[in-house]
Amino acid sequence: MRLVIARCSVDYVGRLRAHLPLATRLLMVKSDGSVLVHSDGGSYKPLNWMSPPATLRVSEPDDADRAEGITEVWTVQHAKSDDRLVISIREQLHESSHDLGVDPGLVKDGVEADLQRLLAGQIELLGAGFTLIRREYMTAIGPVDILARDAEGRTVAIELKRRGDIDGVEQLTRYLELLNRDPLMAPVRGVFAAQQIKPQARVLATDRGIDCLTLDYDAMRGVDDSASRLF
Amino acid sequence: MRLVIARCSVDYVGRLRAHLPLATRLLMVKSDGSVLVHSDGGSYKPLNWMSPPATLRVSEPDDADRAEGITEVWTVQHAKSDDRLVISIREQLHESSHDLGVDPGLVKDGVEADLQRLLAGQIELLGAGFTLIRREYMTAIGPVDILARDAEGRTVAIELKRRGDIDGVEQLTRYLELLNRDPLMAPVRGVFAAQQIKPQARVLATDRGIDCLTLDYDAMRGVDDSASRLF
DNA sequence: AATTACATCTCGCCC
DNA sequence: GGGCGAGGTGTAATT
């Protein structure tokens, strides 16, 4: 990885066009040819960038550029598209190179897949007498997160979200509509389960006869102690 | 902005939990307290990060950490939530600080990719005899992208997307439901137009009697040469 | 390789 | 502040 602090202007041409006026920025060149242009603020998204795979070519400025004080022109060309980033450098204030090696990568816990695994193992959270039919029940319009059977023997489709908003209710509604067309399966009722359910989503779900269930991930993780031994 | 290259492990606890095993990485500390942990690959997204506003506290390792070779512990605490990033540093290979100033920010030129403007000007793409009623036709639940009239004099609501997926079909369905409540306007039919339409979206649209239209942006741009003269 | 759905999405906009 | 829509989305899993 190469780190450069430079006064520069940047132009991107590709799926859109974008321009960064002259200012001092961090240029990060990664070993796969990708380049990130960061300012001293904002969040993790760079001001501008080129995704890998890409190649960086450093060239001399032409006469017009030189007259404007540009000392070096970086052309970062994407390997598989016409996307191009051109960095015009006026002054290089810092430069260093570092060998970082390959990163072992991130281990995550608490994403939707973890929620689904936990709820499938604690299906009684939905109510006494509930039994699991299966996870990821495939339909023509996508997989139903969890299919279960309630104490009365009725089929229940469960849609799981980390944050439950209107889109999730719409999704579950489509599944219910489809499943209820199957006379062998109908009537199927729905449960919308999420760590947090937005008020509007709750209203919409209730209006459509869909039950809402707020999940306590920490408590569920505590019950399944294989999860708590992850770290 | 402070740049540190260090052998470190990282733990994030907040909306989820995540762990980065020991490796050499770039730590970028921005002046708003945000921290980015980058490896020498991937794309612009860091391996882990803390969004601003946040505060960085550097502390001595406890005895257990010291025994494992940790020399410094960085705790990055988000100012408005319980999100926390803990960086355990074994070895600091590089350190530098830079004053970048405030960035003037990005100027996007081609952002308006005005598919809508182009289609409104080439409304005959929808079929012979189509005429434009208006763009951004306001309703109580939001603007219909384009409202047109077909050769038979019937009103047509058009939803435009760059990438057409199920959400767009749902959106158009809500508009159609509303517009068809108006006896002066009903019956209104729908057209779902996008550069690319996902199979599931096409199935749903067809099932609801909504026509699908795939748009060739480059061809449309070629017809309207004012667009090709933008730059 | 292409498709699909999730994301600590981020980033605007408008209300 | 929340809600909605778009992104040069990125990313992982599955087909």
Image (tube, coloured by chain):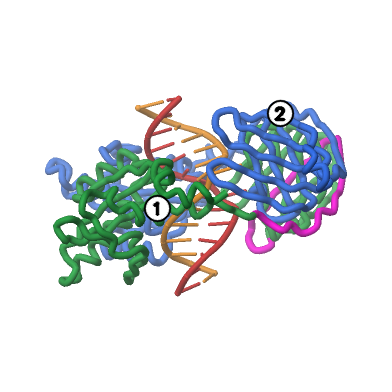
Chain colours: A blue, B green, C red, D orange
Q: Chain of mark 2?
A: A
Counting from the top left corner in percent of width and height, residue A74 is at 74, 36
Residue B95 is one of the magenta-drawn residues:
yes
- Residue ID at (65%, 46%): A48
Q: Amino acid at mark 2?
A: Ser
The answer to whether residue B23 is left or right of residue A166 is: right
Query: The N terminus of chain A lies in which quarter of the figure?
Result: top right
Counting from the top left corner in percent of width and height, residue A150 is at 25, 48
Query: The C terminus of chain A lies in which quarter of the figure?
Result: top right
Disc number placed over residue B118 in the picture, else none: 1
Could you classify mark 2 by the number of other residues whose Cα lies within 10 Å: few (under 14), some (14-19), or many (20 or more)?
A: many
Q: Is residue D9 above or below residue B41?
A: below
Q: Chain of mark 1?
A: B
Q: Is residue D13 above or below residue B172?
A: above
Q: Amino acid at mark 1?
A: Leu
Magenta-tinted stretch: B79-106
Residue receiving disc 2: A31
Is label 1 in a helix, a strand or a loop?
helix
Counting from the top left corner in percent of width and height, residue B84 is at 68, 52
The answer to whether residue B216 is left or right of residue C6 is: left
Q: Is residue A72 above or below residue B184?
A: above
Q: Is residue B47 visible?
A: no
Counting from the top left corner in percent of width and height, residue D3 is at 43, 64
Is label 2 in a helix, a strand or a loop?
loop
The answer to whether residue B26 is left or right of residue C8 is: right
